[in-house]
Amino acid sequence: MSKKSIESIYTYLQTIKTSQLYLKNCYKDLPDIDTEKKSFENSGSFMYYLNQGKLFLKEGEKVDIRLKPILYFYGLGHLLKACLLTNRPNYPESTTILAHGVSSRKRKKKHYTFVDDEVKIQQNGLFSYTHNHLFNSTTPSFSKIKMNVLLGLIPEMEDFFAHRQEEHCVSVGKIGSTSLAFPVHLLDRYHLTQRAFLQRVGMHVPSIHTNATKDHLLVEIEKPIQHSTGPFYFHLDKQEVYFPCTRELFLPIHEIMIHYLLLYNLSMISRYETEYWAELFSTQYDMDHAIISHYLNFSVEKITFLIGEWLLQRAPFS
C-alpha cells in the first residue's frame, strides 16, 4: 500500500459527508445498529478526531524535540479514537475506558536509563480497550514491558541498532510477497528445532510449503502478510517484513500499540521528569538521547501510515 493511497484516505475523510459514508460502510454488518442514524451521529466526532490527531502530529514535527512526545502521544490517541468509532458506534460506553490505560513507574534517582524503564498495562483504559476492539486481541500476554523490548520490535530502529552491532529483528521478505526466508541462526536464539520453529511461525501465517538451505528456512505462505503486527512488522522505507530475533520479542501486539506505549512513557517523562529530560537534551551525553532522537525522527510518518492503512482496510471502497 503506497504512501499516496494512505494520504488519500485522510484527505477523503475531511468532510462530514464522506465521513458519514465511510462509517455507514463500516456499520453495515454490525448487529442491532441503525446504520443510517449512527453513521450520521458519529460522522462529526469521527472527522474531528482524525483532524485533531493529524494536527497534533503535524504541529509536533515543528516544535522543539523536548515537546514532541506530548503532541505525538495525544495525536495518536485522537487517531485511535477515530478508529474505534468505526466498529464501536457507541464509544465511549463508560468513563472507565477514557483513561490512558497505562502507568509508568517513578524514575530512579541514580543510574536511570530509558531503555530499561518499563510501563505497566492496566485492566481498563484506552490501551486495553483499543487492543481488544481494533485488533481483536485479548489483554496482552504481558503486564509490564520494558522500553528496549518495544524499541526492538520496530524495524526502523534496526538502522540505529546496527551501529551498536545489535540485532533485534531481521528482514525475512518483501512486503506483499508470499515468500519468507528465516535465517537459520534464529533456531539457536529461540532454542527450538527446525520443526518446532516452523510450527510457531505457522500459527501466525499458514504455510503451503517449506524448504531449507544452509543459511535459511524458506516458507511459502498462502497470502501476503496484511498488517504490521507481532511477530511480523513492516519497514516502510525498505518495504520489507521483519521478524524478531529472540523469544523475548515474539509478542502478539500490533505496532500501533507499541508506539502508544513508547509515546505514553516519553510524554510522561517529558512532563514530570524535568531534570532528567532537560539534562538529556542539553548535555547530549547519554545513549538515551540518540535512541529517543532517532525514534522521534520517524515515528510520525510510521504512525500516520499505520493508522491510514487500518482505515483503508477497515472499510475499503470498491
Image (cartoon, grey):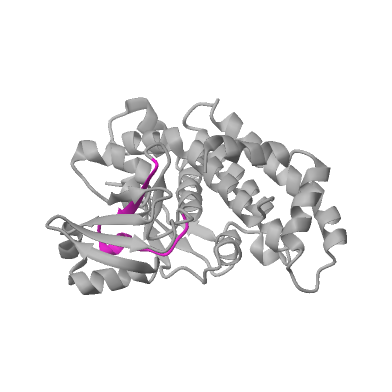
Residue at 78% over, 44% down: 18
Q: As drawn, is 211 to the left or to the right of 220?
A: left
Residue at 81% over, 69% down: 33
The answer to whether residue 182 is above or below residue 201 is above
Residue 244 falls inside the magenta stretch: yes
Q: In this picture, which residue range is highlighted in magenta?
A: 239-254
So how many labels did they put on this image?
A: 0
Q: As drawn, is 89 to the left or to the right of 289?
A: right
Residue 224 x %, y %: 43, 56
The answer to whether residue 293 is above or below residue 200 is above
| Residue 41: quadrant of the picture | bottom right
Report the front residue among 281 and 10.
10
Residue 80 x %, y %: 62, 52
Residue 52 x %, y %: 69, 40
Residue at 47% over, 53% down: 261
Q: As drawn, is 280 to the left or to the right of 122?
A: left
Q: Is residue 89 visible?
A: no
Question: Residue farthest to the right?
Answer: 37
Residue at 18% over, 41% down: 165
Report the front residue among 147 and 183.
183
Residue 154 x %, y %: 38, 48
Report the front residue among 18 and 122.
18
Q: As drawn, is 263 to the left or to the right of 88?
A: left
Q: Is residue 208 visible?
A: yes
